[in-house]
Image (cartoon, rainbow, N blue to C red):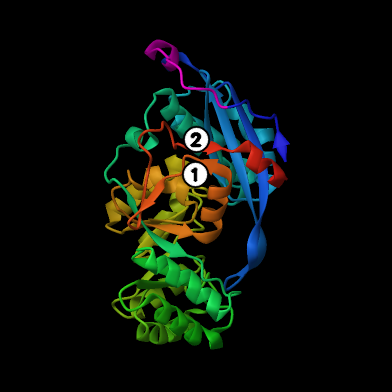
Amino acid sequence: MLFNKPRTVANPRSITRRSTESAGIDALTVESYTVPTDGPESDGTLEWDRTSIVLATASAGGEQGMGYTYADSATATLIHEVLAGVVRGMDVLSPTAAYMAMWQRIRNLGRPGVASMAISAVDCALWDLKARLLKVPLVTLLGQVRAGAAVYGSGGFTSYTDRQLAKQLGGWANEGMAAVKMKIGRDPQRDEERVRVAREAIGPKTRLYVDANGAYSPRQALEQTSMLADFDVRWFEEPVTSDNLDGLRFVRDRAPARMEIAAGEYGYRAVDFQRMLAASAVDVLQADMTRCGGVTGFMQVAALCEANNVPLSSHTAPALHAHAACAAIPFTEMEYFHDHVRIERMLFDGLPQLTKGELQPDLSRPGNGLVLRRSDAKKFAA
């Protein structure tokens, strides 16, 4: 799907302070692409064979900024038909004002889900545009606090054979990643053997994480923690659905001391994260800037985590998170998700570099540094 085909990205050019301050957003365009996976994939509660990415491009002052979300093409429709008209003409140096205007506009559409993902993509594009106009990397604009964000390899789908599982997770461990994560929960009777295969593949020093995607009841999840502890699993993500805060708290209160309970990837509003923190439901809070309101929303979650002394981890879309992750004070580690790493390598130039288990933003490039390779992307156009 392609709405109002974006202009070719312009070369950086000098913009005076006066002209930048007075600039309004000229246009907002959107594109949608669907990329097949490299094999059948599943987790504890879902199966899929393709991934859709929706890209928003904002233009002003001869520059363009880009953001994206991994979402259905309905998200692109909402950006084109609703949000483009909201942000057009707004101050290019005030992306937070545009963020608030978008939230107000979608009041009767419902904030979670598609609307939030649409706003997330646009917000990321506006922050990227602002940084490009000011000719600084996005992390510099946000305030850099670390050179790189630690990553953990993430995949280990329940559809994988034991051999595929061992190869993927073992490969990440050999590359120097300090932690890897696998999916569990689709077949609880097979969980123990699959976790055993993973531990043998990565060795005793690499941290092993598991993600049930809400597949268990609280008591089932608690029962699994004993088995997982035998393999020194350090992170149990969504042992029960994140809609069940009492259930998460039940598991967290009774899990082995070395096992952290994590959730938050389905948070769409600041209040979603605040409720999770108030319920003491997690040891680690996750946030996905392709869902939670883009850069603006992600930094709001970081502030909540800092105020509550809870570490923050990002969910998927590693290339998009790299700059914000290096500016968020309570940030600990980033999900290096197989599907999204593959798509970002296929579609973009200017990716942050993975060095010694850390993803480091390219400080020689303005904004988020990403440029879409249209010649490669066009075959995936929805």
Q: Which residues are magenta?
A: 9-20
Where does residue 370 sit, x and y in percent of width and height? Answer: 49, 38
- Residue 155 percent across, percent down from the top left: 51, 66
- Mark 2 touches mark 1? (CB < 8 Å): yes
- Distance (Cα) linking label 2 and label 1: 8 Å
Give the side of residue 190 with respect to residue 327, left or right: right
Instruction: Indicate which disc residue 99 carries.
Output: 2
271 and 283: which is toward the camera:
283
Q: Position of residue 178 (x, y in %)?
A: 33, 65
Of residue 159 and residue 184, the one placed in the foreground of this image is 159
244 up-or-down from 285: above or below: below
Disc 2 crowd, CA 10 A, few/some/many (<14, 14-19, 20+): many
Q: Which comes sooner in the sequence, label 2 or label 1? A: 2
Which mark, residue 378?
A: none
Query: Is residue 287 placed above or below 104 in the rendered structure?
Result: below
Give the amino acid type for the residue marked by disc 2 in the picture: Tyr
Residue 277 makes an appearance in the image: yes
The amino acid on which the numbered mark 1 sits, given as a three-letter code, is: Gly
Instruction: Tell me the quarter of the picture where residue 88 sits.
Output: top right
Q: Residue 293's mark?
A: 1
Q: Residues within 10 Å of mark 1 (few under 14, many from 20)?
A: many
What element does badge 2 sit on? Answer: helix
Any magenta on residue 75? Answer: no
Q: Secondary structure at mark 1?
A: loop
